[in-house]
Image: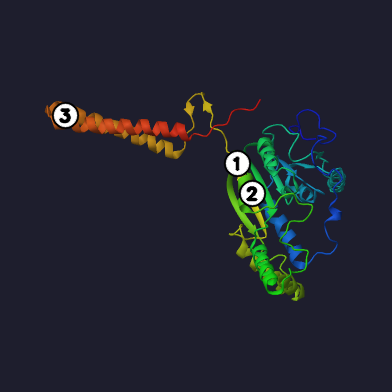
Amino acid sequence: MVKAQTKGKVPEESPPKEPIDKEWDDERVIPKHLSRDTQFLFSRMTEETLKAVGAKKGQIVLDVGCGRALDLAAQGEKGAILVGCDGSRVMVMRAKGVVQSHGLPANIVFCSAENLPFKKGSIDIVYCKGAIDHFYDPRRALEEMERVLAEGGKLVVSVANFESLSCKLARTWNRLHRILTGRELPGPHFWEIPEDHTFKFDRAFLLACLPEGLRVVAERGVSLFWGMKGWGWLVGRLPSAISKALMGLADRIARPFPALADVIVLTARKPKIMVQHHGPGERGMKFSESSKIQGLAICLGSAVAAILFLVGIAAKSYWALAIPVGIGLFWLLGLVFWIGWTLLTLRTKPPED
C-alpha cells in the first residue's frame, strides 16, 4: 500500500450513514452496444483526462471514483504510485482484479469521495473522470480532494456537460415540436440527467463547486453534437475514416469552448504557500518578480526625495523644500495604502488540526 495513503488503517467500509449505493454496478447502466459517437466521446474523454493528469515516476496519483480502474491500468508504465477509490464494493473488487491482471499493486480503497481516508497533503495528483455527477455531495467531495492534495499538486475533473450545444439545440427542438404537435419527442431524452446521476453539471456549476484553495489553470472541451439524432445517424452510416475525421473536426472546434462541449475537462492547482527561510544568504519571504519591481520603485523614490530635500536646504528656498516634502508625503501615503491593500487582499487559510 502507499506509505502516505491513509490516516492509520484503511477502513473496511464507508461510514454507514452515507447515502451511497455500496452495490452499484456499471453493467446496469453501460449498454452492450455503443454508437460511434459514444465510442468516440468516451475515448476522447479518457485521452484528454489522462493527458491532463500527466502522471510521472514517483508521483502519488489518486483516481476518485475509479470504477473498474481501467484508467489506472493505462498509466501502469508511467512509474507513478497509483491509488484508486470507489464507494461500491462491486467496483472495488473488479478494480482489484483489473490492476492485478496488469501486474500492478492493488492500491484500491473502498470509501466515498466525500470522506477520503488519506492524510492531508499526501497526494500529488488527484483526478476524477466521469464520476463527480454521481456523488451525493460534489462540493464536499472536491473539498476532500483539495484537502488530500499536496501543495503545488494538481486536480483534474472531467464531467458530462448538460448545457452543451447538443443539449441546448435538442431542448429547443423539443419545445418547437411540442408547440407544433402538442407532444414531446419520444424519450429517453439525452439532455436530461440519467437516474444514476445525482447532479446536473455544466461549466458554471463545476466552477462554483471548486474550493477556494484551488486555482483553475486549464479548461478544455471534448466533442460536439453527441446524442443528437441526426448526428449519430450520420456518423454511424458514413465510412469509418470519414466518420472519424468528421467527429475529430467537431472535437477540435469544441476544445476552446468547454461551456458548449459535450464533456468538460478542468485542471486546477493547489498553490504553494510562501514560507520564510532563515538559512545563510536567504532571509525573509520569497517574493515574486513584481514585488522586486515594487521594491526598486520604493528605493528610487526614497533616493530622489532625499536628493531634492538636500537641494532645497542648500538653496534656502521655500519651494525647493516644499516640492520634495510634498513628493515625500504623497509617496509615504501611497506606501501606506499599498501595505494596507496587500494585507486586505491577502488570502489566508487557518491550519487544520
Q: Which of the two discs, 2 and 1, labels the residue nearer the N terminus?
A: 2
User: Mark 1 — residue?
Assistant: 214
Residue 110 placed where, x, y %? 82, 39
Disc 3 marks which amino acid? Gly
- Quarter of the picture containing the N terminus is top right
Residue 177 placed where, x, y %? 69, 72
Residue depth check, mark 3 versus mark 1: number of the one nearer the observer: 1
Asked if residue 309 is positioned above or below residue 34 in the image, the reply reads above
Residue depth check, mark 3 versus mark 2: number of the one nearer the observer: 2
Disc 1 marks which amino acid? Leu
Labels 3 and 1 touching (C-beta < 8 A): no
Q: Which of the two discs, 3 and 1, labels the residue nearer the N terminus?
A: 1
In the picture, measured across the screen, residue 317 lies left or right of residue 71, that is left
Question: Which label belongs to residue 312?
Answer: 3
Badge 1 marks a residue whose secondary structure is loop
Q: Which of the two discs, 3 and 2, labels the residue nearer the N terminus?
A: 2
User: Mark 2 — residue?
Assistant: 206
Q: CA distance from mark 2 to mark 1?
A: 13 Å
Neighbour class for label 2 at 10 Å: few (<14), some, many (≥20)?
A: many
In the picture, measured across the screen, residue 174 lies left or right of residue 301, that is right
Residue 86 placed where, x, y %? 80, 43
Disc 2 marks which amino acid? Leu
The single residue placed furthest to the left in the displayed view is 316
Residue depth check, mark 2 versus mark 1: number of the one nearer the observer: 2
Q: CA distance from mark 3 to mark 1?
A: 53 Å
Badge 2 marks a residue whose secondary structure is helix
Q: What residue is at 67 percent from the left and 33 percent from the top?
A: 121
Residue 100 placed where, x, y %? 86, 45
Neighbour class for label 1 at 10 Å: few (<14), some, many (≥20)?
A: many
